[in-house]
Amino acid sequence: SIATFLIILYGIHGLILWSLKKLVEVTKMDKSKYWKNVVAPQRLLTASSAAIGGPATAAALAQSNHWESLLTPSLLVGNVGYALATFIGLLFYGAANKSLL
C-alpha cells in the first residue's frame, strides 16, 4: 500500500541522514569547523525538508526557526530537485513504456 511505501521511503531517508552525521562523528572529522558547518543539524533538517516536501516546506522550516541563511538555499535546492526529478521521471516512464510494449 502507499502507506508502507512512504514509511520505507522516509525511513531510508532518515537512516541516510543519521548515517552521514554518525560517519562524520566517527571519523573524527567533526574537529574541523568546516565539517561541523556542513553537517550541522539545521542544514540537515532543511535539506531533508527540501528533499521530501519541496521548496515551500523547506523555506517555511528555515523561516520559522529563524535560520535566515538557509532560506535561499532551501528554495534553490527544492526547485532544482523538482526540475531534476521531473526529467528523471520522464526518462523512467519512457524506458518502462518501451519495455512494456
Image: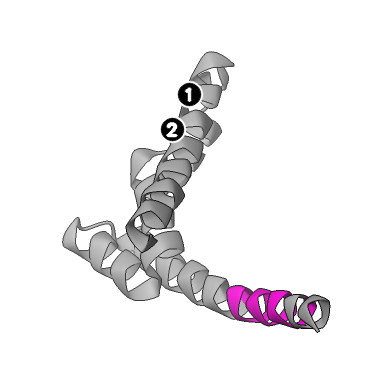
Q: Are marks 1 and 2 in contact (CB under 8 Å)?
A: yes
Question: From where the camera sits, is residue 87 visible?
Answer: yes
Residue named by callout 1:
22
* The magenta segment: 84-95
In the rendered image, residue 43, in percent from the top left (x then y), is placed at 40, 48
* Above or below for 90 versus 43: below
Label 2 SS: helix
Circle 1 Cα neighbour tier, 10 Å, few/some/many (<14 / 14–19 / ≥20):
some
Q: Position of residue 60 (x, y in %)?
A: 24, 68
- Which element is circle 1 on? helix
Residue 49 sits in which quadrant? bottom left
Residue 31 versus residue 83: which sits nearer the camera?
83
Position of residue 42 measured from the top left corner of the image (x, y, whole percent)? 33, 46
Image position of 69 (left or right of 65): right
Residue at image x 47%, y 42%? 12
Task: In the rendered structure, find residue 18 and report the number of the disc placed on it.
Answer: 2
